[in-house]
Image (cartoon, rainbow, N blue to C red):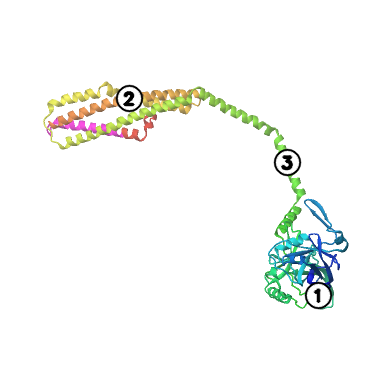
Amino acid sequence: ARAPLAPDPSKGTWIELRADDAGGLVEGAPVLFRGLTVGQLQNLRLAENDSGVIVDAFIRTPHDQRLTSSTRFWDTSGISVSLGAAGVSLNVRSLATLVQGGVEFNTFTSGGALVESGHRFRLFSNAETARESIFGDGMSDPVRFSLLFDEAVRGLEQGTRVQFRGVEAGEVVDISIRVETDTLGTKYARQQVVIALSPERMGLARDTDPDIVAEFLANEVENGLRARTAAMGLLGTTLVIELTDLDNVPHAIMKLDAEPYPTIPVGPAAQNDLAASAEGVFTRINNLPIEELLASAIRTLDSISAVAESEDTRAVPGELAGVLEEIRTLVNDLNAKDAGEKTVVALDRVTSAADTVMTEIEGLGDTLVSVDKAAAAAADMPLGDIGRNIDGILGDLRAMLGSEDADQLPRALSDTLTEAAALLAELREGGAAENLNSALGAAEGAADAIAAASERLPEVTRRLEALIAQADTLVASYGERSSFNAEVLNTMRELRRATAAFGALARTIERNPRAFILGR
């Protein structure tokens, strides 16, 4: 190194620019600000430990007042070609920079502090990279370390990002081959990757000494920190270097005295989950028996075609249509003869007749209770001589039992049961719409007969009540041991049996009204 040359240092500010390589830098090249020459480069030299190059830059007054800690410098030598959404962009800054190179600077953000002579800046490769660096510290003075891989890593290049536990903390600055010798004297080659790390992005102070940074990383390595390659992006096409904590890795330490830089142990490459899944899917697809599947599919299609083209299969629609037509004809026939409406009417009449019978039977129950009470009173009560009145009462009883109404009631019930049985027989034996209509007509007649018979029940009930009243009066006027008393007791027993028969009939009809019609 040598002191920078300037006719009058008081007319400007000297700074240092650090770069990975000299590139198009030459002594005497201009320093530009917004296209204007405001200084020049001098004293281009190698950095310590051959870690890059350093060049001094003199910025003349008053432009040196624009220099702050947020200022960024970038190389403008040669021709810049970029490909973007707008197409190919060709940029030639000036004829002077095209011939002899040069650098340019700008302050993209405010808030930086003014710098003094001797301040170090990093020289970026282009304006875009310099502008992106405003979101970090710019790595003005990065610390370098070496990574040794046993096999060549494809995809690594200068500028590849380096992440420290997920945070971008540096980049790859050099890739080379390093030949080493094992304990048996055998030489073998390893890929050496040099990375530059920013102390500030690892949580340390910006101006932390490189030895302290190395000790910090050595402690982290003791706790499982390793360097490894990792594929990023949807299909894992972008490669990065990760400094991250790994589980179940062999014990290792950093070689702090290694040349040219301290060496960080490496671990196995990270597996991209999406890429591995896609690779697994492609492998399964490749292993599928495609030809066998196609042959099986062809055989299946042939079988389906044979079934579809057979005569039996073609006859199925016609047969199905015939069955549907027969069903349609039967339904239309039933609808034309009003079978449904007649069925509803007949059932309504039968239900009405059954309701009438049940109503009369409920009233008959009260009458039977009165008969039981009268019989009990006759058994306990002392009877007098009632001979002269018994003939009249017996005559009335015979007249009632021999009346036309009493004779017609069993006959009407018998006729009703006969018609109901005939109706059920015809329904069971028939199957056509005509038989159904006839059965419905017979049921309608039977319902009318039941209704007519039930209308006579109130008259019979009233006569029984009158008879019981006369019997009570008669029993009260006769003695206990007269012959008439014995005859009356026999008569009352007969009445009680008749009452029990009526009660049984009433309970049967109440439990199952249809049995009165069907005869069972």
Q: Amino acid at mark 2?
A: Ala
Left or right relative to 378: residue 79: right
- Residue 503 in the magenta stretch? The answer is yes
Q: Secondary structure at mark 2?
A: helix
The relative height of residue 103 versus residue 409 in the rendered view (above or below) is below
Q: Is residue 128 above or below residue 403?
A: below
Q: Residue at x 12, y 29 (%)?
A: 386
Q: Residue type at mark 1?
A: Asn
Mark nearer the viewer, 1 or 2: 1
Q: Which of the 4 image quarters holds residue 519?
A: top left
Quarter of the rendering containing residue 263: bottom right
Q: Amino acid at mark 3?
A: Leu
Q: Is residue 120 magenta?
A: no
Return the mark for residue 453: 2
The image shows residue 40, relative to residue 215, as above or below, that is: above
Mark 2 → mark 3, Cα distance in angstroms:
76 Å
Give the farthest residue toward the right: 99
Tell me if residue 15 can be seen: no
Question: Toward the viewer: 11 or 519?
Answer: 11
Q: Which residue is mark 1?
A: 49
Of labels 1 and 2, earlier in sequence is 1
- The residue tagged 3 is 301
- Residue 8 spot, x, y in % from top left: 81, 72
On residue 354, the disc is: none
Can you see residue 223? yes
Rounded to the nearest angstrom, the CA distance separating label 1 from label 2 is 133 Å
Q: Indicate whether 311 appears above or below 46.
A: above
Residue 255 in the image: state x and y as whole percent. 75, 76
Q: Which residues are magenta?
A: 478-504
Which badge, 3 or 1, is on the more N-terminal residue?
A: 1
